[in-house]
Image: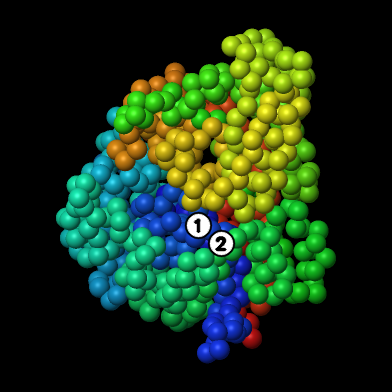
């Protein structure tokens, strides 16, 4: 997902807003001019191009800006830092002109040199392990655009062929050249650029430079991130007033969604991302506690269980990343389809979401115009445990005297399923999946772990099965190319040989290669109807092969206190997409 969409997409989910300051005595004091948000788990990095998990993206969202952003009404790209763009050579050459007078939060001028630096030396730099590079690749060869600095206020992008998502990808977050250039010129003992250690969580916050509405004023691990308004923020209000109107934010770092709920109900926060299990409780309190629950429709996220299908080996030890016995199960399409039939998705919706959602079939959300429904021909796996058993038996599995499943080599079918602890919905879903698979004789060891640990084991391929969600990436399918392309950094079920995560013997299947071709063609095709046909085929392949098995699509429900004035909830963008213009009533 490109950074500028992440900024808008994540903002609505993290501003659960009210405020407290530490008084001289050390006790929290409520200050109504400040907003507080909550996030589950600490960030791993403040560097926007090294982020791989939501907590890091959430806490840096307010520091970022790009050449383009999404228009809230049309959801099409419009200028952000750019004043305008011009198109030449039948869509193969774009020239952007920068707004005048832009500055970084430290007062340095923000110019097209920063834009040139961001693309050519950060995003396009193969020494930097960033998934932002994946969504910039064009055509079968994966060619990157040619970016040329024309002057301080103009830059040129030349494309090798038509690229439908280009203006979206041009919205990548711009970083300050004067801060990061030395980190590319210097290397550590292993020869890696110091950029890979830049803006870590141990970086003094005054060194974190912003182009967005806020800067970070304080970070206390395990407790909070405090923001104050960026005095050099480029945007002004309709009357020329300074933005953002709310001058201070606090994000509390909490240990679970339950804690976030308790803080909202006790009046400590002004917004909360409502789970289905919370809805009835909060609906009864809506008038009394003066907040409104907004229904923004289906989430764009992919919520899924996945099996590690990697057949690769660790180049250092020569050992396979996945136990070869279990790898045979995970690579068996009959096994994955049996699991899909055994999962009672409607039960997950009813139990975990209290009915506020629907079973997830396609990996493209119903909120997207590219969604393929079952009515239009998508293969689905309705709950049918007997069919699951029959599939397994037909594939050579058998049941022992205790009705436990054994594979054709008589190994007991048992694996470990991980998710991130503190996410109550995923923990509840994991328990239900464990119970469902037990009904077809599969033993699941369900082990929730800390999110940062979860990221670590996926990067190292040291996992068997996992429950996670991928951000939806807006309405452009190519925003998920870092997931779906076989070379993508988030292609976690069969992660490739990456510069910072080496692997020997990576095998790319024929269906993965077909998806690569679809994404190449999909970005080349400019007509929506023809693109839709291509991405329909992509959704069919995913449902046939099941690298990810969907769980459910919850409704996006945000509870926002009524004292926030100027709230303008929008599907896709969220409840607080226009945070810089929102004010707090007295």
Q: Quadrant of residue 21?
A: bottom right
Seen in the picture, residue 196 relative to 294 is either above or below; the reply is above
Q: Quadrant of residue 278?
A: bottom right
Q: Position of residue 462 (x, y in %)?
A: 47, 36
Q: In this view of the protein, can residue 470 be seen by the observer?
A: yes
Report the side of 120 relative to 407 (left or right): left
Q: Position of residue 293 (x, y in %)?
A: 72, 63
Disc number at residue 561?
A: none
Q: 77 or 493: which is nearer to us?
A: 493
Secondary structure of residue under mark 1: helix
Q: Write down the residue under mark 2.
A: 39
Secondary structure of residue under mark 2: strand
Disc number at residue 55?
A: 1
Q: 133 or 498: which is nearer to us?
A: 498
Q: 300 or 414: which is nearer to us?
A: 414
Residue at 64% from the left image edge and 72% from the top image edge: 269
Q: Position of residue 508 (x, y in %)?
A: 41, 22
Residue at 69% from the left image edge and 13% from the top image edge: 398
Badge 1 vs badge 2, beta-carbon distance below 8 Å: yes
Q: In this view of the protein, can residue 243 be seen by the observer?
A: no
**What's the distance in space between the residues labelled 1 and 2, CA to CA?**
7 Å
Q: Quadrant of residue 414?
A: top right
């Amino acid at each position: 997902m490109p950074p500028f969409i992440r900024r808008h997409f994540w903002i609505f989910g993290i501003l659960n807003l009210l405020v407290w300051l530490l008084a001289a005595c050390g006790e929290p004091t409520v200050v109504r001019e400040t907003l507080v948000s909550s996030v589950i788990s600490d960030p791993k990095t403040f560097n926007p191009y090294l982020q791989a998990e939501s907590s890091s993206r959430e806490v840096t969202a307010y520091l970022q800006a790009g050449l383009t952003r999404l228009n809230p009404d049309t959801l099409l790209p419009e200028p952000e830092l750019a004043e305008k763009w011009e198109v030449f050579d039948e869509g193969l050459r774009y020239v952007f002109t920068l707004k005048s007078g832009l500055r970084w939060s430290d007062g340095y001028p923000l110019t097209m040199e920063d834009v040139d630096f961001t693309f050519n030396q950060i995003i396009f730099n193969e020494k930097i392990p960033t998934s932002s590079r994946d969504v910039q690749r064009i055509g079968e060869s994966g060619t990157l655009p040619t970016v040329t600095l024309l002057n301080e206020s103009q830059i040129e992008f030349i494309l090798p062929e038509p690229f439908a998502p280009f203006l979206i990808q041009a919205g990548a977050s711009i970083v300050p050249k004067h801060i990061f250039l030395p980190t590319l010129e210097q290397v550590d003992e292993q020869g890696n650029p110091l950029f890979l250690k830049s803006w870590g969580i141990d970086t003094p916050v005054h060194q974190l430079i912003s182009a967005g509405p806020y800067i970070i004023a304080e970070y206390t691990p395990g407790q909070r991130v405090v923001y104050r308004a960026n005095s050099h923020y480029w945007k002004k209000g309709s009357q020329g007033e300074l933005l953002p109107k709310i001058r201070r934010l606090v994000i509390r770092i909490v240990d679970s969604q339950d804690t976030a709920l308790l803080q909202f109900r006790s009046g400590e926060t002004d917004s909360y991302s409502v789970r289905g299990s919370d809805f009835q409780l909060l609906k009864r309190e809506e008038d009394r506690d003066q907040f409104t629950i907004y229904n923004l429709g289906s989430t764009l996220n992919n919520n899924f269980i996945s099996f590690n299908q990697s057949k690769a080996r660790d180049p250092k030890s020569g050992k396979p990343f996945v136990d070869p016995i279990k790898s045979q199960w995970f690579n068996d399409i009959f096994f994955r389809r049996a699991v899909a039939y055994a999962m009672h998705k409607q039960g997950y919706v009813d139990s975990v979401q209290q009915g506020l959602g629907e079973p997830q079939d396609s990996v493209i959300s119903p909120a997207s115009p590219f969604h393929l429904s079952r009515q239009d021909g998508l293969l689905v796996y309705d709950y049918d445990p007997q069919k699951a058993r029959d599939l397994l038996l037909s594939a050579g599995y058998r049941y022992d005297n205790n009705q436990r499943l054994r594979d054709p080599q008589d190994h007991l079918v048992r694996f470990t399923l991980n998710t991130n602890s503190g996410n109550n919905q995923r923990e509840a879903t994991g328990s239900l999946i464990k119970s469902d698979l037990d009904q077809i004789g599969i033993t699941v060891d369900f082990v929730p772990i800390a999110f940062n640990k979860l990221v670590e084991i996926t990067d190292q391929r040291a996992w068997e099965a996992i429950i996670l969600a991928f951000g939806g990436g807006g309405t452009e399918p190519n925003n998920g190319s870092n997931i779906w392309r076989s070379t993508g950094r988030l292609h976690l079920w069969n992660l490739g040989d990456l510069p910072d995560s080496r692997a020997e013997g990576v095998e790319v299947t024929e269906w993965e290669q077909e998806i690569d071709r679809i994404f190449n063609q999909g970005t080349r095709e400019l007509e929506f109807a023809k693109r839709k046909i291509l991405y329909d085929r992509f959704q069919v392949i995913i449902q046939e092969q099941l690298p990810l098995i969907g769980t459910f699509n919850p409704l996006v429900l945000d509870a926002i206190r009524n004292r926030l004035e100027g709230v303008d909830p929008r599907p896709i963008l969220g409840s607080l997409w226009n945070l810089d213009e929102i004010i707090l009533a007295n």
